[in-house]
Image (spheres, helix red, strand yellow):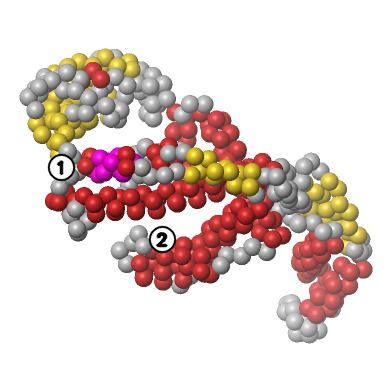
Amino acid sequence: MQVSVESKSGLERKLTVTVPAEKIETEIQKRLQSLTSKAKIQGFRPGKVPLSVIKRTYGAQVQQEVEGEILQSTFYEAVTQEKLNPANKPQIEPKAREAGQAFEYSATFEIYPEIKLAAFDGVEIEKPVADISDADVDSVIERLRIQKVEWKGVDRASKQGDKLTIDFQGFIDDKPFDGGEGKALPIELGSKRMIEGFETQLEGAKSAESRTLDLKFPDNYQSAEVAGKPVKFEVTVITVEEPVLPEINEEFIKGIGIAAGTQEALRKDVKDSMTKELNEKIKSVLKQNVMDKLLEINQIEVPNSLIDKEIDTLKTRSGVTAGQLNSQEGGPDAFSSVLEKEARRRVTLGLVLSETVKQNNIKAEPKKVRELVENIASSYEKPQEVLQYYYGDNNRLAEVESVALENETVEWISTQVKLKDVKTTFDALMKPGQTVA
């Protein structure tokens, strides 16, 4: 067998394999000969069919079978011989062959890159650090009060923070349009749920008052039929209500699940929850910083076929329809550009992480895997069933093991670099509105 390798663009390779005619013909003859005792052909007794008849009847089929099998076996033999690691399914092109000739084919595919990992000497990675102040605890408790808000009807002009219940009808070019009508719709002034100007033009309105709002749909509005068009809304205010926050008393505290019912117990419970959330957030940010640094110091070429496959995966996960793409700013091309960038990042990071794990013999410790599964299970009503769900299926457990291995790798890298503490605040790290007790 003769093998030659041609480097195409990037990581693409063209493998040409030539198998001697003798090997092909010998196998073909062997199979044809075996058919003489098995084939059933009209006019001949079993086992008495002449080889010439067998060849005429089955020759083309047997040749095709033999060439297919030899192609498959010699391909893997050839890539092993040439130390190639295919990254995608090869494009096979067999060369037409006459009897007595050598069998030749080419296989074009991309290979995985050879990765020489950058050293961590002198590498610095930022790690956020933050304290939880009394003001941070107060802020979370205030949000808990807001979650328990009650609404009280008022006989005054509305203002930001009030809730209005309204009926409305929209008109474009003085005609009603689909989706432009609402009955008894509650809206909070200042929530910015409606298109720009809708809520602000209702400030100062009273119960039973009617107003006409002259507005314009955003150019990138989700419905392409009305995007960018002027619109008029006829609005009737049914009620105006103001928020009434509960007092922080024993009833309120017990109502959010703190049996002691004291403010001290409330503050301790909230701070414990915030501390757990803060630690998880610090881990998450550090992990992201480690990943970003890995990409920064390891600039590698990656197979386009893997990027294309990842793009398809991201498209499926996004669930974005063709209509939604067209309505977004920049359209399909902009969306594809974003997907290509993210896919390239994911593929590159996956290859670099895999090589880091391999070269440093990093493993997912069973204890850490168990902790992850238990953490997932703790958020369900029946944790034991969730544990059985994962440990009863190797594929499901493998998903958790992959996350555990990634975490172990981040921890290992953190010991190889210099971690720079970056002082921040709880709110700045957690992002306003995302903290829950």
Number of residues whose C-alpha sits closer than 10 Å to that of mark 2, classed few (under 14), some (14–19) or many (20 or more): some
Q: Is residue 188 left or right of residue 27?
A: left
Percent of width and height locating residue 212:
20, 15
Q: Residue at x 19, y 58 (%)?
A: 260
**What is the secondary structure assignment of the residue under circle 2?**
helix
- Residue on which the image places disc 2: 376
Where disc 1 sits, the SS reads: loop
Residue 416 visible here? yes
Residue 71 spot, x, y in % from top left: 79, 62
Looking at this view, name the residue that lies furthest to the left. Answer: 155
**Residue at the image point whose x is 24% and y is 52% from the top:** 264
The residue at which mark 1 appears reads as 247
Q: Is residue 91 visible?
A: no
Residue 137 lies in the magenta stretch: yes
Quick check: 197 left or right of 7? left
Is residue 244 one of those drawn in magenta? no
Q: Amino acid at mark 1?
A: Glu
The x, y position of residue 228, in whole percent, is: 38, 19
Q: Nearer the viewer, mark 1 or mark 2?
A: 1
Considering depth in this image, is 253 or 318 the residue closer to the camera? 253
Total marks drawn? Answer: 2
| Range drawn in magenta | 136-144
Q: Main secondary structure of the magenta part?
A: helix
Left or right: 110 with respect to 222? right
Q: Provide residue 409's location: percent of width, then percent of height.
A: 60, 57
Residue at 59% across, 54% down:
410
Q: Quadrant of the N terminus?
A: bottom right
